[in-house]
Amino acid sequence: MALIVQKFGGTSVASTDRIKSVAKRVARWKAQGHDMIVVPSAMSGETNRLIALAREISALPDPRELDVIASTGEQVTIGLLSMALKEEGVKAKSYTGAQVRVLTDDTFTKARILRIDDEKIRRDIADGYVVVVAGFQGVDENGNITTLGRGGSDTSAVALAAALKADECQIYTDVDGVYTTDPRVEPDARKLDTITFEEMLEMASLGSKVLQIRSVEFAGKYKVKLRVLSSFQNEGEGTLITVEEDRPMEQPIISGIAFNRDEAKLTILGIPDRPSVAYQLLGPIADANIDVDMIIQNVANDETADFSFTVNRGDYTRAMDILEGAVDRLGARGVLGDNRICKVSAVGVGMRSHPGIASKMFSALGREGINIKMISTSEIKISVVVDEKYLELAVRVLHKAFGLDKAE
Ligand code: ASP
Ligand code: MG
């Protein structure tokens, strides 16, 4: 017998029929003797609808009131799900975030959880109830309702699992797990049985469609066993997100190929190579709240340097304006930009103990005539920037080169 937290996403509770099937699934787990905490999202589309309503009244809705409104979607589904469980003959009780007391800070619309009072939940579980807790919401110390940011019910579920020391936190969604890459780009992509927290964070560009990234960080920090599963299938173990030590022994070196289309590259040419130029260049970019990803500096014989970095494509024009402004100030030769690039990464904790991954990656791309424009590495990731037109090809070539394709 275990204590399990199950979270159901918006599509899993999109209609009363679907809520009934969620209740049936929860009832089966309960019948097997498990203690259950269930965290539903709002019905799919509902949070968007509520926010749109608020915007009809006010172009810039008051954040406190916006949270009062946006949090109601989950209040509906906890009540409906508890009723559906009772129809299945299961004792169930619903709580809003404030009723549990999911205490958060007071950053409306993106609050952070500070503490969860577990007293009522523990008492109800001891009395044989399935406890249904509203995702996405909490309450600050002054009793104001808060919400945790879009997709926040994943984080609610993980935080409840951490607070109650649950044996597993299961995230039911409309995909059946985390894949080696996006199956729309590579039809041979495979579902992973396990992936580490670190890899999952590095695969954010793929993983964030599955889980709110904050929930993965949270689960990693508190060592919550996190599993992603499909709510539309009755079989399958989904993907277990785990700490490295708990991975099965025989794992491929590379777990997946991640990519990001929304990248842009900027270069400033021929800046005098002297201390603090990097700061003078990137300081104003940071001040404008623009995130910089890869950075490369080449030093030429004439003691000038070319300096390139990448930003989110949406920030390209603003970053370009700032760079152009810096040309005269720094005595540079000029600027170049390219906003038709993408980033492709091989991710795997196995590369820590296996040298030669980078050269394998570069040779695979070279054989296809794909030119690499920038490279960056971390302990468990190698990323390259290539022309956007090569994205699909690069992903498929690397997926194959690292043996990730489905077995024939
Ligand atoms: N209902 C909220 C949203 O749509 C929270 C969630 O679904 O995780 O963002
Ligand atoms: Mg979600």
Image (cartoon, helix red, strand yellow):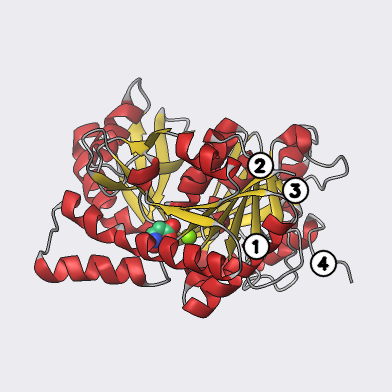
User: On residue 254, which mark appears?
Assistant: 3
For the residues marked 4 and 2, what is the alpha-carbon distance in whole angstroms? 26 Å
Rendering quarter of residue 6:
bottom right
Residue at 71% x, 74% y is: 187
Indicate which label's residue lies in the foreground, 1 or 4.
1
Q: Where does the image place residue 285, in percent across and percent down from the top left?
A: 28, 40
Q: How far apart are marks 3 and 2 (CA)?
A: 22 Å
The x, y position of residue 165, in whole percent, is 60, 34
Q: Which of marks 3 and 2 is in front?
A: 2
> Whole-Å distance between the Cαs marked 1 and 4?
35 Å
Q: Which amino acid does label 4 sit on?
A: Lys
* Label 1 CB-ligand 1 distance < 8 A: no
Earlier residue among tags 2 and 1: 1
* Circle 2 residue: 225
The residue under label 1 is 27
Q: How far apart are marks 4 and 3 (CA)?
A: 14 Å
Which residue bears the numbered disc 4?
406
Amino acid tagged 1:
Ala
Nearest to the eye among marks 2 and 1: give it.
1
Check disc 1 and report its element: helix, strand or loop: helix
Image point (67%, 60%), residue name = 177
Mark 4 falls on what kind of element? loop
The nearer-to-camera label among 4 and 2 is: 2
> Which residue type does callout 3 highlight?
Ile
Residues 284 and 133: in front is: 133
Q: Please give left or right for residue 323 compared with residue 297 in the image.
A: left
The 10 Å Cα crowd at callout 2, few under 14, some 14 to 19, many 20 or more, is many
Q: What element carries label 3?
A: loop
Which amino acid, by three-letter code, is at mark 2?
Lys
Say which residue appears at 52% left-offset and 72% top-offset.
19
C-alpha span from label 2 to label 1: 21 Å
Q: Residue 5 carries which label?
A: none
